[in-house]
Image (tube, grey):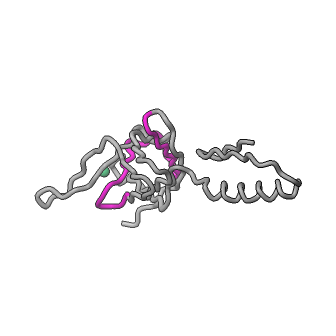
Amino acid sequence: MVYRCDNYVFSIPFVFRSKTQLMLVLAVFLAACSSEIKPPLVATDIVITEPVPGREMSAAYLSLTNNTNELIDITKITSAEFDAVEIHESLLEGGIARMRQLEKLAVPANSTVELRPGGKHLMLMRPTKTVDSVSLKFFAGTTLLLGINASIQPRND
Ligand SMILES: [Cu+2]
C-alpha cells in the first residue's frame, strides 16, 4: 500500500492480522499526515489602505509565511482591481524618505516576512474600478502561490 500525503509518500508494507489493526495504523498515519499539511505560503495581518485622494494608488501591508523548506521568490503579484502591483521598499536617503521598486520578494524557508509602513510593502497602482475589497494573486514565475481577498481600510487622517 502506498499513501500519498502532500509531498510525503508513505509505504505500508505490513500484513495486517485484523481489520482493527489496519484501522489503527491508518488512524495514526492520517493524524500524522494532517498535521503535516500546511499551505506553502500564508498571508496574515493584511491591511490595504484607501487611496490617497488625488493619487491613484493604495498600499498593502501583510505578513507572508513560508511553510516549506525552500526559499520562495515571489516574482509577480496581480490584482483584478488594479492595473499593476509593485513590490516596494521604503528607505531613507540623506534624510529623505524614498521608495524603490524590488524585482521580487524573497520569503526564506520556514520564515515570515513582514511588509510594514516604513519597510517593504506593496503598491497597488491605478485602480480599474471603485472597490471596497481587493483581490491579490502571488506568483513565482507562472506558478500561482496564493490568492487573497481583503477589504480596504478607510483613511483616518
Ligand atoms: Cu511604495
Q: Quadrant of the N terminus?
A: top right
72 horizontally vs 6: left or right: left
- In the rendered view, tell whether residue 83 sits above or below residue 120: above
Q: What is the quadrant of residue 62 in the picture?
A: bottom left
Q: Main secondary structure of the magenta part?
A: strand
Query: Residue 51 magenta-drawn?
Result: no
Residue at 51%, 39% in the rendered image: 144
Residue found farthest to the top: 142
Residue found farthest to the left: 94
* Image mark count: 0
Magenta part of the protein: which range? 115-141
Q: Position of residue 87 (x, y in %)?
A: 34, 46
Q: Position of residue 51 (x, y in %)?
A: 39, 52
Residue at 71%, 55% in the rendered image: 29
Q: Position of residue 113 (x, y in %)?
A: 39, 57
Task: Name the one closer to the observer, 43 or 95.
Answer: 43
80 horizontally vs 53: left or right: right
Q: Quadrant of the C terminus?
A: bottom left
85 horizontally vs 148: left or right: left
Query: Residue 127 magenta-drawn?
Result: yes
Q: Position of residue 104 (x, y in %)?
A: 34, 43
